[in-house]
């Protein structure tokens, strides 16, 4: 649950719409804003980019009244209740940190940061300033994913034995693309692998041991990675991600008395099938009233609910859980030998630029 009350933006009560600022103007920012402007309790009041021209174009597109050519100007806007940070993830620490230090509440895209150290710094800032902070792990807010988790938690398939999940896209991407650029945190793991890793964490918590192998690019980022996660109770998770091959993006959770199969798009599912020993398969489908499975509305609604309640964390996407996922991603990167410029290895030496 939340760690406190009196969050900025929550003290005026539930009668006023939540005022959003959008930091960045790329594809993710546009997709999120398109869903946000359809919510009656949300009001997008400002947008910022490092380019004033880009900010103005974005503002015109979505009818946003204020456009800033700097992140700092957005962060210092007291007419904003919460900022959605949608920069490339290499900039998440700087952008979200700037907003938190200025007293803004923050929803920050995934992967939360490049590494655990940066994530811990953001969490410390939020807790120190008493501000709301949440990773935009929309999968955790998806109603059908929440239904799946509830079934597992209620023992529908018995004790969880294995989790399998994959996420891959075909590419190919040239070396100049952000997914191949080490300076931008490129590679399959952080951009795509965060989903299967987070899915395993959702059902089993943090693993006790991690093994992994990868195929690396000439630039030193992972083109595809496979990892095996192990829990002390005996459960295993097999996760895979790729930027050189389109996978089925399916998932399966096997327990001692059955299994749940998500045939495609496990992070935004349209349906899943519950198989229980001695019973006919049961299909669960997304409720049309919840909007399309690809909608970002549910994470926005959760942010606004938490702000109205005076919570500084979401119980659906708790900060300790975000830190645990980052710890696992760091462990995978350590096993496969991927380090980004500016990161230090165990000896304290930074990675080459």
Image (tube, rainbow, N blue to C red):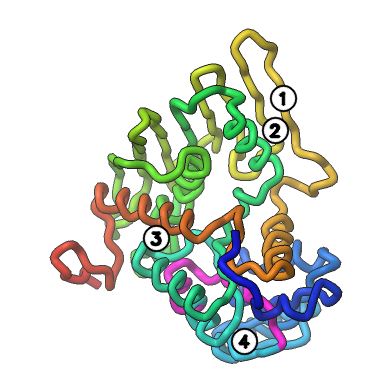
User: Would residue 69 be seen by someone viewing this image from the given angle?
Assistant: no
Q: Residue furthest front?
A: 4
Q: Is residue 275 left or right of residue 219?
A: right
User: Would residue 199 be seen by someone viewing this image from the given angle?
Assistant: yes
Work out whether mark 2 precedes mark 3 in sequence or the reverse, and give the earlier one: 3
The Cα–Cα distance between marks 4 and 3, rounded to whole angstroms, is 27 Å
Q: Answer yes or no: do the residues labelled 4 and 2 have beta carbons within 8 Å? A: no
The Cα–Cα distance between marks 4 and 2, rounded to whole angstroms, is 39 Å
- Tag 3 secondary structure: loop
Above or below, 43 relative to 78: above
Which residue is at a point 42% across and 38% down the rendered structure image? Answer: 239
Q: Which residue is mark 1?
A: 283
Above or below, 273 relative to 181: above
Q: Which residue is mark 2?
A: 271
Q: Quadrant of the N terminus?
A: bottom right
The picture places residue 252, in percent across and down from the top left corner, at 53, 29
Which residue is at a point 75% across and 38% down the rendered structure image? Answer: 286
Circle 4 residues within 10 Å: few <14, some 14–19, many ≥20: many
Q: Which residue is mark 4?
A: 74
Q: Answer yes or no: do the residues labelled 1 and 2 have beta carbons within 8 Å? A: yes
The picture places residue 253, in percent across and down from the top left corner, at 52, 29
Above or below, 26 relative to 299: below
Work out whether mark 3 precedes mark 1 in sequence or the reverse, and give the earlier one: 3
Q: Which residue is mark 3?
A: 186
């Amino acid at each position: 649950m939340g760690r406190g009350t009196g969050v900025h933006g929550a003290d005026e009560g539930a009668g006023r719409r939540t005022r959003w600022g959008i930091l960045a103007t790329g594809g993710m920012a546009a997709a999120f804003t398109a869903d946000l402007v359809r919510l009656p309790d949300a009001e997008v009041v400002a947008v910022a980019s490092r380019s004033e021209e880009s900010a103005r174009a974005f503002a015109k597109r979505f009818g946003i009244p204020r456009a800033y050519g700097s992140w700092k100007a957005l962060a210092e806007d007291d007419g904003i209740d919460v900022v959605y940070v949608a920069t490339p993830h290499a900039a998440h620490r700087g952008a979200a940190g700037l907003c938190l230090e200025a007293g803004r509440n923050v929803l920050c895209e995934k992967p939360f940061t490049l590494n655990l150290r940066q994530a811990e710094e953001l969490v410390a800032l939020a807790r120190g300033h008493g501000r709301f902070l949440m990773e935009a792990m929309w999968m955790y807010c998806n109603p059908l994913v929440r239904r799946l988790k509830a079934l597992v938690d209620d023992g529908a398939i018995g004790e969880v034995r294995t989790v399998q999940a994959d996420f891959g896209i075909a590419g190919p991407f040239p070396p100049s693309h952000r997914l191949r650029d080490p300076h931008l945190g490129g590679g399959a793991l952080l951009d795509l692998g965060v989903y299967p890793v987070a899915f395993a964490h959702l059902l089993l918590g943090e693993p006790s041991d991690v093994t992994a192998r990868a195929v690396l690019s000439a630039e030193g980022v992972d083109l595809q990675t496979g990892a095996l996660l192990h829990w002390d109770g005996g459960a295993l998770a097999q996760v895979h991600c790729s930027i050189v091959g389109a996978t089925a993006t399916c998932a399966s959770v096997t327990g001692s008395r059955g299994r749940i199969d998500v045939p495609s798009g496990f992070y935004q599912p349209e349906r899943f099938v519950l198989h229980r020993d001695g019973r006919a398969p049961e299909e669960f489908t997304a409720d049309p009233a919840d909007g399309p499975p690809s909608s970002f509305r549910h994470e926005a609604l959760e942010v606004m609910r938490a702000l109205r309640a005076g919570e500084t964390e979401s119980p659906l996407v708790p900060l300790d859980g975000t830190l645990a996922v980052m710890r696992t991603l760091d462990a995978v990167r350590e096993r496969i030998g991927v380090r980004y410029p500016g990161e230090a290895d165990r000896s304290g030496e930074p990675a080459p630029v």
